[in-house]
Amino acid sequence: MNAIVLAPGVTLWREKFSRAEQKTLLDDVLARIEDAPFYRPVMPGSGNPFSVEESNFGALGWVSDKNGYRYQATHPVTAAPWPAIPDALMDLWREIAAAPDPECCLVNLYRGSARMGLHQDKDEKDLSAPVVSVSLGDDALFRIGGTARKDPTRSVKLSSGDVVMFGGPARLAYHGIDRIYPGGSSLIPGGGRINLTLRRVSA
Ligand code: MD3
Ligand code: FE
């Protein structure tokens, strides 16, 4: 279905979720957020707050605090287990990922000038499975490079309903979100962007 290969291991499906499917998925996500509210992580060491707010669904959630980055089974504020991953996202993974079921759906909320600096995702024991990303709401300027920080990067605008899969040679690529374009989408109440990333954590 209209897959574009952006680079080796990087596949993009523009508007894989229709507007109606985006709305249904967002309602499902926001219902689960009632049980696992967005919170603002802080950087290990410095304790500086992230500009994004986060939550998770699934058996394991990715968290960051003064002590480091890790996966854990419970919400750092409520101490409750994370809600289950929405069915529509499990279906998506099973359609495109060719890997055992995801254990984590990290939920990132970008409002205003929130961004995410260039980084690698390498806290997962299983680096053979891809990461699958779903964008909802306002457009974002996404940047992806190579496996070394100094490698050249390219920028791609991601819009609501877009799905990107990062696997194989791209699994350890540096990537980040330079900015959000506010006000472009009416999907999310209060505006902004939600990114959902599905990950396999255990080997
Ligand atoms: C490329 N999130 O949560 S999703 C993250 O839009 C993260 O919220 C961004 O980077 C966001 O870690 C980008 C796209 C993405 C996610 C994981 C990747 C790209 C990736 C892992 C490896 C390579
Ligand atoms: Fe990442």
Image (cartoon, grey):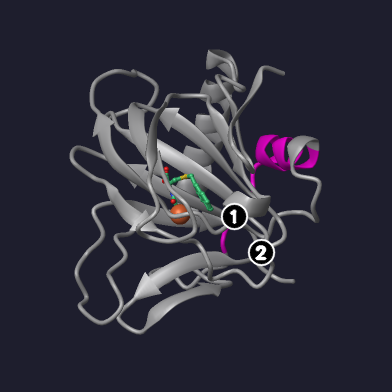
Residue 46: where, in percent of width, then height?
A: 20, 78
State the image coordinates of residue 118 (x, y, percent, origin top left).
Answer: 34, 54
Q: Quadrant of the N terminus?
A: top right
Label 1 with label 2: CB-CB less than 8 Å: yes
Judging by the rendered image, the residue that carries numbered circle 1 is 171
The answer to whether 152 is drawn above or below residue 69 in the figure is above
Which residues are the magenta region?
A: 82-94
Nearer the observer, 51 or 128: 128
What residue appears at the point 27 percent right and 69 percent down from the top-left corner?
42
Please name the residue shown 34% across and 32% down the image.
140
Q: Is mark 1 within 8 Å of ligand 1?
A: yes
Q: Is residue 39 visible in this depiction of the protein?
A: yes
Q: Residue at x 43, y 24 (%)?
A: 159
Instruction: Give residue 134's position: percent from left, percent from top.
Output: 54, 36
The amino acid type found where label 1 is placed reads Arg
Q: Quadrant of residue 101?
A: bottom right
Check disc 2 and report the residue beneath it.
127
Determine if the magenta segment contains residue 91. yes
Secondary structure found at label 1: loop
The quarter holding residue 37 reads bottom left
Q: Quadrant of the C terminus?
A: bottom right
What kind of secondary structure does the magenta stretch mostly adopt? helix
Alpha-carbon span between mark 1 and mark 2: 7 Å
Which residue is at the front of the view, 90 or 75?
90
Q: Is residue 96 magenta?
A: no
